[in-house]
Each structure stands twice: as C-alpha cells, then as structure tokens.
Image (cartoon, helix red, strand yellow):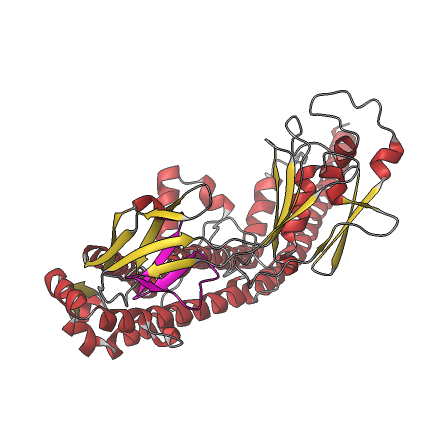
Amino acid sequence: MRINGFSGMDIDSMVKELMTAKRAPLDKLNQKKTTLEWQRDSYRELNSKMYEFRNTKLQQTYRLSSALNTQKAVVAGNTDAVRAEAGATANGIKMDVSVEQLATAKAKVTDGKGQGFTSRQSLAELASGIKFGEPTTSLGASDYAKEYKIKINNIEMTFTGKDTVSSVIAKINSKSELNVQASFDELTGKFSIAAKDLGTMGILDVQPLNAGDSSVFDVFGAGSTAVVSDVTAKDAIVKINGILLNPAPTSNVITYNGVTMNLLAETVTRDSSNAITGDKPFTITTQSDPDKALETMKSFIEDYNKILALFNTKVGEEKYRSFQPLTKDQRSAMSESDIKLWEEKAKSGLLKNDDILSGLTSTMRNIMGEKMGELSNIGITGGKYFENGKIYLDEDKFKKAIINNPQQVSDIFQGSGANTDNSIFGKLYSEMDKAMTKIAERAGTTKFSGDVNSIYKEESVMGKTLKGYTREITALERRLSDMESRYYKQFTAMETAMSKYQNQASSLSSFFAR
C-alpha cells in the first residue's frame, strides 16, 4: 500500500508511467508464452480428431473384414441351432447342415453343496457349511487364515478362508497361461474348471489335493471331501450336404464355403438309449447385399473429406500478425465482445503452413492419387484442383462394382492376407499414426488417447520452451519489482529533501519577518 507524498506530485502515476516502458519486454514474453500455449492447444484438438479417425473410424470400423462384405447368410429350417455369417469369399453353395454332437470341453466338477450358497461368500463360510445370511460368529481367525490349494496345468494356486467364491473364480480366470474357465452355479453349489479349448485338443490337468493341505475342491464339496467328476471332451459331429466332416471339428465355430457357422444346438433327436430317432437340419444360402458396403464407403468418404478439409483449413488459415495476445491492461480497457473478436484474430493461423499437417495432407492425397485409376473404375473420383484432394462417390457405379467383383474393392481398401498394411485403409492408418507421434513429441500430447483434457507431457519440445519462458518471466518480474521499489525509494528521498527545504525556507521567512 503506497501513499503519495505531500509535494503535490502524483508519484503513483509517475512510477506507473516509468514502469510501462520497462514492462514492454515482459509483455512480449507473456505474449510469446500465450501464443505457444494456444498453438499447443490447437495441436491437442487436432490430435483428438486424428485419434477418432485412426482408431474409431479406420481401425474399429472400416478395416474390419465385414465392413465391405457384400455377402449375406440366410438360414432356413432349424434356425435355433446356428448363427451364420457370410464372408467376402462366400461362394454361394447351398449347405444342408446336420449337427449330431456339439464340441464340449474337458472339465472337472464338484458334487456341490446345493442351494443357499452364493459367490459373495468366503471360503471359510463354505467350508463350515454356513449358508448366505446365516450368522458367522462361530468362525474364528484360524478359519479365515486356513489355506486352500489347487494345481491347474502345473501351476499351483493358494487361497485363504478370506477369499470369496467370486475372487477365487476371478483369480483363476485372470491367469491366461492356465487357459481354463472356472465357474460356480449358485443353484446347485457346483464348482467347475473347464478347458477353454473345446474338443479333444483342449488341455486340462487339475490336481485337487496337495499333501498336507486342503483342496479348493473340498470347500465346494457336499461332504467333508468333495466328489470330483470328470467331464470328457468331445469333438463335434457335423454333416454338410450328407458328408461327415473329417477330421471332426474341435470347436463349435466352423467355416466352410466362406460361411462361418456358430453351432448352438444339436439338430438330431434321441431316444432313451441315446440312439438318433430324427433330424431337423438347417439350410444356409448366401445372397449378395451391396447396401452395407455402400454405406461403409459413403461414411468413409465423408469422414476422409471432413478431416482433410480440417487439415487444409488449419494449414492455409490467415495469420494476423498485428493481433497479439492481450495484456492485462489491454483486456481491462476492452469489453467482453471486443476481447472475443480480438482473440479470434489472434488465434487464427497458429498452424499456418505447419510442416506436420502439410506433410500429412500431402501424403493422404498421394495415397488416394496412386490408386485413382482403380478407384475411378469403381465410382470414386477426385474433385477439382482447388478442392484440395476432396473425393466423390458415384453410388450406382460403386454398387455395380461391388456386386460384380467384391474382392477387387476389398483388396483396394482393406488389402488381402498379410498385405493389409499396403491397402488404402492400412496406409492411412499408418500415416495418421506417424503424424500423431510427431505431434506428441512436439506438443506433449498422446497418440493413445483422444481426450482433449489430457495432461501434456512436459518433456516435449513445446513443454521445454514453455518452461524456459516461465523462468525468464519469473526472473524479469523480480527485476521489475526491484526497479519499481527503487523508483519509490528515490521519490521518497526526493520528497524528504523537499520537505526539509520547505521547513528551512519557512524558518528563514519567519526570522526576516521580525
């Protein structure tokens, strides 16, 4: 808090005027820092758009084999026994399918404690026969500390009485190296461990007992020692057009003639001796359906044009060099609407002629241009030169192409076999990934997320530059504060001297007046 002197001079205004010129370098530094922060924010917004195009659009939608698939599987007859999906290579051969036996997994199952036990209970409660909701006061620390062991496919696991049924199952299922699936049936109280791989190829080696320790199976058993039953693995028995599949499928998901069938139930009926008494097969045919592929292509072209237009806009955006970020004093003298208009100009052109965006835009146009001869044959053409790489779709021509030669369209955009990276979708994904890596190194964003509120990495190029600005601003503010204090001290000394002069003059005047 400063008080003006008694000389009649406005010292605060004088010091402020003196400091205005001295603060000019500080204002320049703050403007540079703000501009760089705005530029970094622009990179983050672009990174979010690129992440969406690369991951959500290309990877999770357009690159999927089903995206440009024109074949549709039609199931007739026993439709409850199967789910079918036709692939791009479906050859249209009609298939009558009979399922005499589904593939099953090798498993071990306890006899079970019956109803009244839930997956929320602890092993200590199950071992003591305490049903859900019953008091557990009879249990002590030793019950909860007791260990229960099991060995699955040569890997030993140990649990304690504190573990709940659900946590036991979760721990077993979380170990991918076991390749098994554990489950608990709350209706019967049965606990089972099954091989993930169906059929006789599935591996399951479970040793319920370990010397000197209780087994996990014993906890789930009805008596003091569980009765553990072995479930034998079976391969599927399937006939297609009267031909028995040999070798027998070891899975319930099979693919023939380009159609993938997920077998859900047997089609045969049996008598009490398990002999087959009848059969209700299902029939699969394929139809050409170009509408899905057409919608995929329309959506891709729209997304491609939109993100290319965004890049072109940012690269060619007008830069107004006379509009710099406002200082505090400037902002205080302007209205909110004027500030908004000013900052719109100041933020324009932050990425003008940016090398990363320019390079990516050029590469995207080249990817499409290299294939333009083939693309024009299926109804995809480029726009005028001033449209900066925009592409158009002739829907009728594309539908004819996708019906007559669906594999050609798929090869151009998705590739085939191990050659998917050289397809249009594969190249766009790769180039987008490279550009996002460069932006991450420069601006401190991450190519693994599209969150516009994610934290910047400080060790990026811009992060280090901003740290340098912060250090310079802090040092300069300290020097200006010292300078301002020195000015006030000088004016205070001047006023003190003037006060003494006035006192002396008053004394002399009174002496001569006598």
Q: In which quarter of the image is residue 46?
A: bottom left
Please name the residue shown 48% across and 69% down the image.
438
The quadrant of the image that shows the N terminus is: top right
Q: Is residue 230 visible?
A: yes
Q: Which residue lies furthest to the front in this view?
A: 273
Residue 318 or 450: which is nearer the viewer? 450
Residue 135 or 279: which is nearer the viewer? 279
The answer to whether residue 488 is left or right of residue 75 is: right
Exactly how many numbered labels are in the figure? 0
Please name the residue shown 49% across and 44% down the image.
329
Q: Position of residue 378 (x, y in %)?
A: 16, 70
Q: Position of residue 234 (x, y in %)?
A: 52, 56
The answer to whether residue 511 is left or right of residue 323 is: right
Q: In which quarter of the image is residue 187?
A: top right
Does the stretch in magenta take in 245? yes
Residue 225 or 215: which is nearer the viewer? 225
Q: Position of residue 293 (x, y in %)?
A: 23, 59
Q: Position of residue 489 (x, y in %)?
A: 72, 46
Q: What stretch is highlighted in magenta?
A: 240-268
Residue 118 or 46: which is nearer the viewer? 118
Q: Is residue 320 visible?
A: no
Does the stretch in magenta take in 45? no
Please name the residue shown 72% across and 37% down the image.
221
Please name the residue shown 75% across and 36% down the image.
123
